[in-house]
């Protein structure tokens, strides 16, 4: 699955595509009751199954400009010890799909992590000869300075507020050890501000709330524009209901404001909105839907 934005090509590389029952989602979306989700009719058939389960996708987005190649978000990764069974010691065909897209690990020049949750940093590294090494050895890894400082210094009180199951799932200490610090120690990381310009076509867009330094990715070329959401919204139902936050949002009030501001900025424009966890078709345009919004695909 790929999109063209001017001279930029954006390709989706999928690690997994789960279907999640609202009854078994660990209370991730407290406001998303089955009745409330079923009332959003446009979510079917792409984003909600006939029986009412949520369709999600965990994928990277490969962004190729005329002069550079950048990977946005690196999923969960293989061989990593995680409390969530579906993510524990994964052995996915992620790198095979990467090669099928015509990319090599060595050809990547930039890696952007929208934030430092476990499912966005995993393929930063891979297990080789008994140690974690950078998956993309020729890339600069761009980390929001604010995001990095939060997770390395200040995340403890935030984690203490989470239910045990979700606190274990986030694995902040583990992911720092196996997915963040190895690239820092290799000298590949560039700590940047949340509005940093990566290239003439790619820049960071501050979208805080889910985490303090969370960013989305704005792509512009030849008068065309796309934006990669990150976890500003996890599922298209949060387009219809921007007030629905997740229990993992470090600042739920800010997260809601960010979504409203984001939708108002891009509503009824030609901007292609690409959801970091949106199931296929993954991308569309934000349009008004009465007093709220929907994703036109």
Image (cartoon, rainbow, N blue to C red):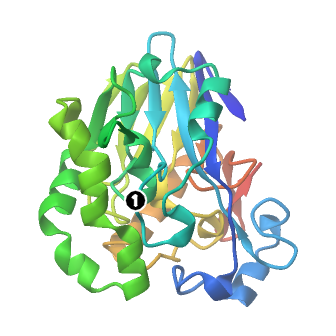
Residue 246, x across and y down, in percent = 47, 76
Q: Is residue 78 above or below residue 212?
A: above
Residue 131, x across and y down, in percent = 29, 42
Residue 135, x across and y down, in percent = 39, 33
Task: Please tell me whether mark 1 sits on a helix, a strand or a loop.
Answer: helix
Dividing the picture into quadrants, the one containing residue 100 is top right
- Disc 1: which residue: 118
Residue found at x 54% / y 56%? 263
Name the outermost residue toward the top: 67
Residue found at x 82% / y 72%? 41
Dividing the picture into quadrants, the one containing residue 188 is top left
Q: How many tags in the picture? A: 1
Dividing the picture into quadrants, the one containing residue 96 is top right
Camera-nearest residue between 159 and 276: 159
Residue found at x 56% / y 86%? 31
Q: Residues within 10 Å of mark 1 (few under 14, many from 20)?
A: many
């Amino acid at each position: 699955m790929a999109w063209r934005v001017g001279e930029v090509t954006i390709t989706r590389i999928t690690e997994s595509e789960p279907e999640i029952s609202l009854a078994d989602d660990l209370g991730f979306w407290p406001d998303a009751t089955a009745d409330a989700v079923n009332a959003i009719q446009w979510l079917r058939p792409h984003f909600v199954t006939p029986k009412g389960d949520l369709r999600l996708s965990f994928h990277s987005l490969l962004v190729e400009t005329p002069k550079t190649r950048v990977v946005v978000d690196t999923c969960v990764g293989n061989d990593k010890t995680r409390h969530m069974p579906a993510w524990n010691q994964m052995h996915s065909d992620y790198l095979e799909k990467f090669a099928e897209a015509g990319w090599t690990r060595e050809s990547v020049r930039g890696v952007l992590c929208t934030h430092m949750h476990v499912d966005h940093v995993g393929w930063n590294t891979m297990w080789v000869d008994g140690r974690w090494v950078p998956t993309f050895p020729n890339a600069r890894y761009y980390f929001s300075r604010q995001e990095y400082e939060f997770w390395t210094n200040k995340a403890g009180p935030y984690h203490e507020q989470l239910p045990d199951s979700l606190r274990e799932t986030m694995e902040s200490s583990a992911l720092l050890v196996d997915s963040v610090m190895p690239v820092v120690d290799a000298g590949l990381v560039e700590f940047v501000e949340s509005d940093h310009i990566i290239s003439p076509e790619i820049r960071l867009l501050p979208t805080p709330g889910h985490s303090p330094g969370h960013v989305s990715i704005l792509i512009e070329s030849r008068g065309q524009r796309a934006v990669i959401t990150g976890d500003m919204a996890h599922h298209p139902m949060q387009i219809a209901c921007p007030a629905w936050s997740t229990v993992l949002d470090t600042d739920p009030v800010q997260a809601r404001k960010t979504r409203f501001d984001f939708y108002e900025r891009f509503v009824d424009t030609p901007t292609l909105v690409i959801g970091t966890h949106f199931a296929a078709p993954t991308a569309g345009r934000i349009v008004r839907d009465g007093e709220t919004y929907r994703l036109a695909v």
